[in-house]
Amino acid sequence: MMKYKCGRIFLIFVFMLRYTKIWRESLHKLYKHGVKNSPSRFVSRLTSPLKPASEKRYLICAHPHGLLVDGWHIAIAKNPNDFAPETHTLGGIPNMKPYLCASPIIRHVPGHQELFRERCGGAAGKDIEYVLKNTDCNPTLCPGGFAESVFCWSNGKKEYSWLKNNSRFIQVAIKNKTDIIPTYSYGNTSMYRTNTWFRQQFAELSQKFQIPLVPFWGKLLAYPLHDDVVTVVYDPFPVDKYSVDDAEQALLDYQAYLKKCFDEDKAKYGMADKELTFIGPRNIPKKKSKAAPPQIRSKL
């Protein structure tokens, strides 16, 4: 098509059309029709309502990553009105208004940009701070990223979470005083089958080069084995007790809190035999320091 003037004009037209309101709303409604019978949904376990953006900001974390954070995407596809600019709810939960922080390229990826529209972008600290300063949304990320997606098929007794030694998101939360809202998508890790050989090595390579390295298959090759995924929203994890220097301890406390939430609800969603296991890279470079490391005590 690039050989002909009319072909080039057509491609430019299609590219520009994809960023219009009418295109995004139409595609989102089409996705809604496609998942109208899906049992996937959001469930709130909040003991008190979330505060509006004028009073409090939050950092929302999606666990586990799965293949493409599928539990979130299916539930979002069912609620096109939640992404109108004036709407502040998500799945019926007030003040959840998310802004997906995944990668700068995400806003150009078909599917993602129609679902999240202008509410998606990079996951660096500066990107999260941009969301906090320039929007009334809550930054939303999956701390496990591409590395955790390699473990998205859990065929044993373990659920995997790539949180070990991964304190960068904790540091951002402490710096910006945003309590962390953990969400857990039960059933996400049985939607697709994936390779289980050398997963640790593939995960480390995936994290290093920031590319997905996960072959997957389901029904008819690419269709999920099921879409019965329940994403539970838990009470925020407070960060006001920590300083940036306490980030490693805050991460350990956050892991303990996430495991506690998981253990309380896993039987309810058909995962009673599962154990949440925290994983990460095998070799962590140590910082050279002559001073003795400070003793860290839990502030949970």
Image: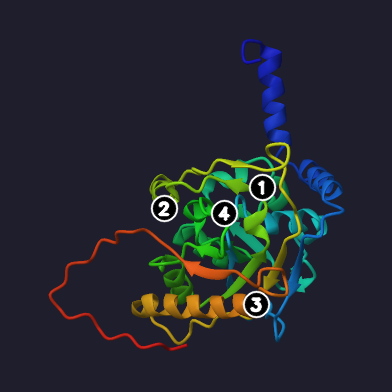
Q: Which mark is residue 222?
A: none
Q: Which residue is mark 2?
A: 200
**Residue type at tag 1:** His
**Earlier-in-chain disc, 3 versus 4:** 4
How many other residues sit within 10 Å of disc 4, few (<14), some (14-19) or many (≥20)?
A: many
Distance CA(mark 3)–CA(mark 1): 24 Å
Viewed as shown, does residue 31 lie left or right of 167?
right
Distance CA(mark 2)–CA(mark 3): 29 Å
**Earlier-in-chain disc, 2 versus 3:** 2
Q: Residue at x 17, y 81 (%)?
A: 292
Q: Nearer the viewer, residue 62 or 55?
A: 62
Q: Which residue is mark 4?
A: 152
**Residue type at tag 2:** Gln
**Disc 1 element:** helix
Q: Which residue is mark 1?
A: 112
Farthest residue toward the top? 3
Viewed as shown, does residue 239 lie left or right of 228?
left
Q: Nearer the viewer, residue 286 or 110?
A: 286
Q: Residue at x 50, y 48 (%)?
A: 196
**Residue type at tag 4:** Cys
Q: Nearer the viewer, residue 10 or 196?
A: 196
